[in-house]
Amino acid sequence: MSNLDLAKNEIIDNFVAPECVERVEIFYQDDDILLIDKPSGLLSLSGKNPLNWDSVHYRLVNGQCATSTNKATPAYASAKLPHRLDLGTSGVMVVGLNSAASKSLNKQFQDRTVKKRYLAMLNGWVEADTGQISAPIAKDKALFPRVKICDATGKRAVSDYQVVTRLENPARTLVQYTPITGRTHQLRIHSLEFGHPILGCDLYNSFGKGDSSEIEGQAQRLMLHASDIYFTHPRTGELIHGHSPNPFK
């Protein structure tokens, strides 16, 4: 492949994340793991662009400075993230604090034994109280950073949902999602696929056509929140349930 071909295939990402002033909250700690609450608007890992240095991982490894309302947090030099949340997604994450714990957590995610639940505020009223969305997801360099639904090249992707409440003025629905698979942007594109995009979503919000400003304008952030995570403690074997309360009340 020529240098010209390489240049054509290279993905150029000029995105710079806006400053996030909210803190990473630590609500459980032992010698092996942390359970933390990630704010919306913060990267999980620092980006390749040097302007995208701020992230959950950076703040954990280097510690967070004290402010007028918050105490300083310690530096966890060996902290590793076995999973990530999108920039706009808030909620609970588990962190490994040593190599053995991180290895165990990584294997649990790879084996898909970790269970996660999310809360999402969707545009419009979802008719069925419960349901399942099954639509294969494929990457596409032409759409970066978006993904697409594709029966021909997509990988199996399944999301279960349950309606929590339906709200008026404007019509919207709070649902609890349980992803059966873990594809990139799965809940965001599945929400769009069944006609109810997540409010505040800048990538999957216009039903594939027309102006999306009305949907984006209903929220100041991506209305997707990682509410629950279930996994096995890497040292004790105990079943751990991490929970972050609903921020959309």
Image (cartoon, grey):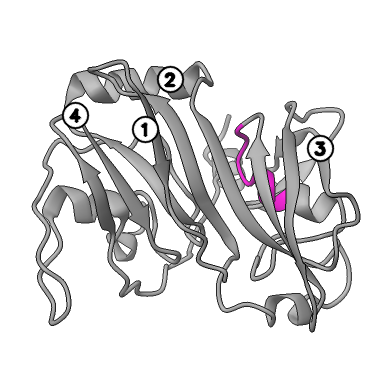
Label 3 crowd (10 A; few <14 / some 14-19 / many >=20): some
| Front label number (2 vs 1) | 2
Residue 108 - label: 2
Q: Quadrant of the C terminus?
A: bottom right
| Secondary element at tag 2 | helix
Q: Quick one: label 4 or label 2, which is nearer the N terminus? A: 4
Residue that mark 3 sits on:
132
Mark 2 and mark 3 in contact? Answer it, CB < 8 Å. no
Foreground residue among 138 and 120: 120
Name the spot of residue 52 as percent of width and height, x first.
Answer: 34, 62
| Front label number (1 vs 3) | 3
| Three-letter code, disc 4 | Asp
Q: Quick one: label 4 or label 1, which is nearer the N terminus? A: 4
Q: Determine the CA span between mark 4 and mark 2.
A: 15 Å
Label 2 crowd (10 A; few <14 / some 14-19 / many >=20): some
Residue 180 versus residue 206 in the image, above or below: above
Residue that mark 4 sits on:
32
Name the spot of residue 181 as percent of width and height, x first.
Answer: 65, 29
